[in-house]
Amino acid sequence: MKLDLLLTNARIATMRGPSLGIIDRGSIGIANGRIAWVGEGEPNTDCETRDLGGAWVTPGLIDCHTHLVFAGNRAAEFEMRLKGATYEEIAKAGGGIRSTVNATRAATEDELFVQSAKRLRALIAEGVTTVEIKSGYGLDLANELKQLRVARRLGRELPVTVRTTFLGAHALPPEFAGRQAHYVDYIVNDMLPAVAKEELADAVDAFCENIAFTPAETSRIFAKARELGLKVKLHADQLSDGGGAALAASFDALSADHLEWTNEPGIVAMAKAGTVAVMLPGAFYCLRETKLPPIDLMRKHGVAMAVASDLNPGTSPIVSLQANMHMACTLFRLTPEEVLRGVTVNAAKALRLQDRGVIDVGRRADLAVWDVESVVELTYWMGGTTPATRLAWST
Ligand code: DI6
Ligand code: FE
């Protein structure tokens, strides 16, 4: 068999089948950046061999929901919240997302790149090989494009795949105060066509919430996105039940994210549409929420669950996917197995990336090698677990 590299003596969580697809002692053969062999024992080959000494191998981790390109921070609001102000109150008083918008607009493209690269490097060091990054802190055409260009540049300059998402409908920018319908017109008529023409976004997102955009406004944006050939995803039912999950499903959304307040018909609609449920325990934790997403209903109806960091300066200043994996267990009571699938195979599904997330013949050789005794340790530790090796060929 013609291989470029053979990893032997590995314990492999392939994610094939319905659970972890474990191979107790096996090897992985790589040719041309793809997995050419995986299984028990070793194939017959004379290529370069690396003995992993019984280390665990998983697919490279995938963080399928982040807002990691932004400038500045919101430590001052963090203190206000500790004194009792709520996230909604701060947002209504012009802070919140809008304070990050001011900082992001003021930053040059290079400054934005440097600040964001620091966060992305921290994720990469934890074994993340694919990350989704949203815009949404520019809120005008020039600055949304600036954010998306920075996201694309991160993918070119750092060893990670970046998928970009246009989130113009994140908050109402100050220049449109009192004129939300006009801002939605601007998104539909100006921003979306420009973003599509420049091919800067792989998908379109919106924040559908009573402090943000209504279901009707979200529908207008999604209809235009679909017309332009762009897939959609939604911040749905995070702070209230706005019917977001069902709305997302009606547009065949890739994913609906947050979902704390989603009702059963919404879950059923997601199951029918194949829309992935993205769990974001970091935001739940930072906002000190108490209403848990309906995870039993997702299990009952067979909705695929992913887990992501929601890394952002307001509700999840947690620069760690692994911390979120741990909290998905402790706060949401997902099993370690569900969480591991949630940052590999199901996160790949949420981004519709068919070439990764599973260790199987033909997939990208996109792997993380872990010096742990049990794969459960990847959700057990909160910090300190870095892969011994990351392999992510760019082919
Ligand atoms: N939901 C969130 O949790 C973040 N955005 C969103 O739509 C919050 C973003 C921020 O506060 O900066
Ligand atoms: Fe988010």
Image (cartoon, rainbow, N blue to C red):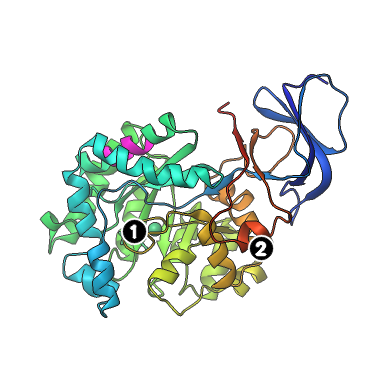
Of 223 and 33, nearer the camera is: 33
Residue 237 visible in the displayed image = no
* Amino acid type at image mark 1: Thr
Does 179 appear above or below 64? below
Kind of residue at badge 2: Pro
Q: Quadrant of the N terminus?
A: top right
The answer as to whether callout 2 falls within 8 Å of ligand 2 is: no
What residue does disc 1 label? 218
Where does the C terminus fall, quadrant-wise?
top right
Is 356 above or below relative to 64? Answer: above
Q: Which residue is mark 2?
A: 336
Q: Which residues are magenta?
A: 145-152
- Say if residue 274 shows up in the picture: yes
Left/right of residue 187 with respect to residue 240 in the rendered view: left
Q: Secondary structure at mark 2?
A: helix
**Magenta part, dominant SS:** helix
Looking at the image, is mark 2 or mark 1 earlier in the sequence?
1
Residue drawn at x 37%, y 72% is 287
The reply to whether dot 2 and dot 1 touch (C-beta < 8 Å) is: no
| Residue 74 coordinates in the image, percent (x, y) | 26, 60
Q: Is residue 223 above or below residue 238?
A: above
Residue 102 vs residue 348, the one in the foreground:
102
Quadrant of the rendered image containing residue 360: top right
| Category of crowding for the residue at label 2, using alpha-carbon neighbours closer than 10 angstroms: few (below 14), some (14–19), many (at least 20) | many
Q: In the shown orientation, is residue 309 left or right of residue 150?
A: right
The answer to which of 192 and 64 lies nearer the viewer is 64
**What is the secondary structure assignment of the residue under circle 1?**
helix
- Mark in the foreground, 2 or 1: 2
